[in-house]
Amino acid sequence: MATKQSGKVGRPRGFDADEALDRAMRVFWEHGYEGASLSCLTEAMGISTTSMYSAFGNKEELFRKVLERYTAGPGAYLNRALDEPTAREVAAAILDGAIRATTCPTNPAGCLGVQSALSVGDSGREVRDLLADWRNNGCSRVHERFRQAVDTGDLPAGTDPGLLARYVTTLVFGISVQAASGATRDELQEMADAAMRSWPIH
């Protein structure tokens, strides 16, 4: 006599969620938030719109997941750079990481977090604000690291850590824009080297 099984067996998703996010990342990276249509996203991800909504939510929720994946992937150089032993090495590692990330031949040029929503309509306002917060958070973390460097004497006592952090992150944003405009890795490295020559010294 057959017994009735309790509960329901979940249907397999049928696709690799991480791979789908990586593909969505490329679409947002290349076309920006508003330029990435749902049809373009789902085609690249290899899933239906229904599957996308079921697995990732709406377009904005998908973008938030993509940004998290970008931060842990191509954008992870910031976390590594902040662990460098001196403020100068932190700044050099940030610039080097930005150059490598924005000119990697296997990825779109530029930075997802800089280019995706600098100019959007009302429908993309929350994403624009999300990315502004994302960029400001990065600057704040660099600021805190440089403040520690001033406190320990690694940076001269009169150094403004906030101004220095803004200087470095502005260079990073400029690197992204230049990379997206076709600047080569060597050209961007020359710019970074020139910037580091003005680094505060005792």
Image (spheres, grey):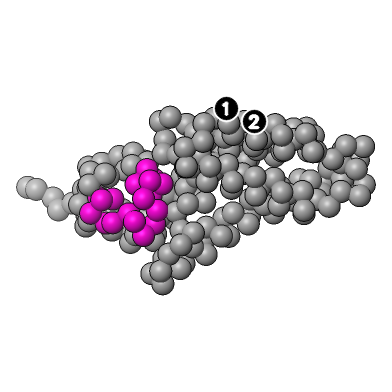
Q: Quadrant of residue 96?
A: top right
Q: Residue 34 appears at what percent x and percent y?
A: 36, 60
Query: Amino acid under label 2?
Result: Glu
Residue at (57% x, 27% y) in the render:
186
Closest to the observer, 67 or 54: 67
Residue at (77% x, 53% y) in the render:
163
Query: Quadrant of the image for the C terminus?
Result: top right
Give the residue at the far bottom of this rendering. Answer: 122
Q: Quadrant of residue 86?
A: top right
Check disc 2: other Cα within 10 Å, few if <14, some if 14-19, many if 20+. Answer: few
Q: Residue 20 appears at what percent x and percent y?
A: 32, 43
Would residue 100 appear left or right of 46 to someone viewing this image?
right
Q: Residue 29 appears at what percent x and percent y?
A: 41, 46
Q: Which residue, given by chain and number where applicable, does mark 1 sit on?
A: 186
Q: Which residue, given by chain and number where applicable, does mark 2 sit on?
A: 190
Secondary structure of the residue carrying tag 2 is helix
Check disc 1: other Cα within 10 Å, few if <14, some if 14-19, many if 20+. Answer: few
Q: Are marks 2 and 1 in contact (CB under 8 Å)?
A: yes
Q: Residue 75 appears at what percent x and percent y?
A: 54, 41
Mark 2 and mark 1: Cα distance apart in space: 6 Å
Magenta range is 25-42
Query: Amino acid under label 1?
Result: Asp
Closest to the observer, 124 or 68: 124
Closest to the observer, 121 or 194: 194
Residue 105 visible: yes
Secondary structure of the residue carrying tag 1 is helix
